[in-house]
Amino acid sequence: MPDSEQCKVLQELVDKYTTSFPPFTPSASSSRARGEFNGIVVLLSGSTGVFGSNILAKLAASPFVKRTYAVSRPSVNGLTVHERHARAFRREGISEALLNDGNVRFLDGDFSMEGFGMEARVFAKLQSTVTHIIHNGWQVNFNVPVEKFEANFRSVRKLVDFALHSQVNDDRPAKLIFISSLGVFRCVDPSDPNKVWPEERLVKPNSALETGYTEAKWVSEQILSEAASHTALQPTVVRIGQLVGGPNGYWSEREWFAALIKSSIFLGMLPDLPEILSWNTAPVAAQALLDMLNSSEPYLHLVHPKPVGWNVIISIFSRKLRVPVVPLDAWADALEHSHELALSNASQKSGTQSREVMRKAMQQNPALRMLVLFTHGRTTSRSKKGGKRTAYDSNAARTLGEGTRCIFDTQRSELTPDWWG
Ligand SMILES: NC(=O)c1ccc[n+]([C@@H]2O[C@H](COP(=O)([O-])OP(=O)(O)OC[C@H]3O[C@@H](n4cnc5c(N)ncnc54)[C@H](OP(=O)(O)O)[C@@H]3O)[C@@H](O)[C@H]2O)c1
């Protein structure tokens, strides 16, 4: 679809979720409710995920936060909401003792549903006590179009309405923090010396185009900016950059960088990328987010303040692993070659045996799972720029960063023999 058409689709989505905002109407019970906790009460979404579990840990440890309601969508695997959080904390290497902090309450709920799909009594309790909302839960999937994010848009809008109906403060609605992504700038060429990534509203969606995920973040940012323009709500959109391993260093090899390192050991070479890295660890980013809770800024970016070149990081890996750094082209060629080899080996088997060959190949060489995206970057850049490798490639690889995980997820659930070639 041409860009102009897609911009129209996105604007229509913004329009759909920005009609008839309710006015802020504090009730007479405000001051009574305020007295119950006498401090910050947070409603948090997505706390079973990488960032959310680290936010929850920081909230639980904060002396200023009197209560955190960690809301998760109802379980699909039979685990209770507490068990799912315990699993997330173990995965991240966060002390599970924090989960038993009396100030954390776990709730099943779905923000896209009326009354968050909760008992009316529970919903009313939230409305009369929550002072801050951190909306972090999101469908992190780069493989679906923006239309597949409707439930996420409904959630953003319902949280806006919830905040405007909150009954804690007489003079202002609950503070709403929305976790967005720096991916909304994905189409800005990182090599452009005049590039500007402003901490402000992006009135036009152009820089966010090409993946439903970033388009959806842009749409949600607009819903919040419109709410801020027409109501008493003062939301803060926090755009996050790349997050890396948790407190125990855990970084799933389903994520692009960990996969890249493991594959580089397999290939015997590490790629050189023209990248500037401003990564944060999830706990550091979570702590910084807590400092933003009372910000009056509408837009903030959460990235490392001292970026380093890719070579700084990769040379450490090179030294420790005794693997040379080679140009990205050479690395990608080697990856493609290993893919062809694996396919050829698999084709000599049939059925489950063939799949098993590919499964093992991807276990040893997990970057094979992001081959499509790397190849996309190479092909596009070559055809667009006459075969010269440019910063566009690294942009493609960077976007692939968050996207790779989704490919992995898709593969796990939707593997078909065709996919294997
Ligand atoms: N990790 C990064 O490098 C990075 C970079 C930029 C921005 N971000 C943003 O940071 C936030 C957290 O990312 P993450 O890396 O921690 O993701 P994650 O590990 O995939 O966690 C996402 C969380 O969102 C919830 N969730 C999943 N699908 C959902 C859906 N369809 N609707 C509503 N909630 C859903 C899940 O909670 P339940 O299933 O328990 O409800 C899960 O705990 C996201 O908003 C993401 O866009 C992350």
Image: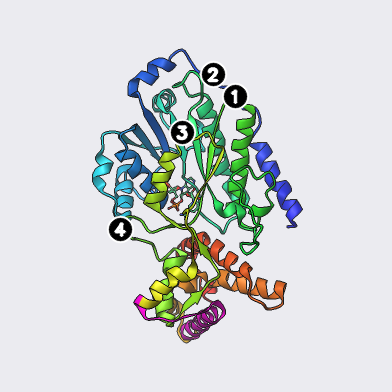
Q: How did the renderer colour the structure?
A: rainbow
Q: In this view, does 224 lie to the left or right of 284?
A: right
Q: What residue type is labelled 3?
A: Asn
Per the rendering, the mark at residue 294 is: 3
Residue at left offset 51%, top offset 73%: 417
Where does the magenta region start and end?
A: 320-346
Q: Residue furthest top?
A: 28
Question: For mark 1, does the 10 Å Cα neighbourhood hold few (<14), some (14 to 19), or many (20 or more) residues?
Answer: some
Position of residue 296 measured from the top left corner of the image (x, y, whole percent): 52, 33
Sequence-first tag of 3 and 2: 2
Q: Is mark 3 on a helix, strand or loop?
A: loop
Q: Quadrant of the N terminus?
A: bottom right
Measured from the top left, where is residue 218 in percent x and y? 61, 46
CA gap between label 3 and label 1 equals 23 Å
Q: Circle 4 is placed at which residue position?
A: 248
Secondary structure, mark 4, is: loop
Residue pointed to by mark 2: 25
Q: Residues within 10 Å of mark 3 (few under 14, many from 20)?
A: some
411 relative to 360 in the view: left or right = right
Q: Tell me, for residue 22, which label it has, or none.
A: 1
Q: Is residue 204 left or right of residue 348?
A: right
Secondary structure mainly formed by the magenta segment: helix
Q: Where is residue 208 in the image (x, y as percent from the top left)?
A: 63, 53
Q: Residue at x 39, y 50 (%)?
A: 284
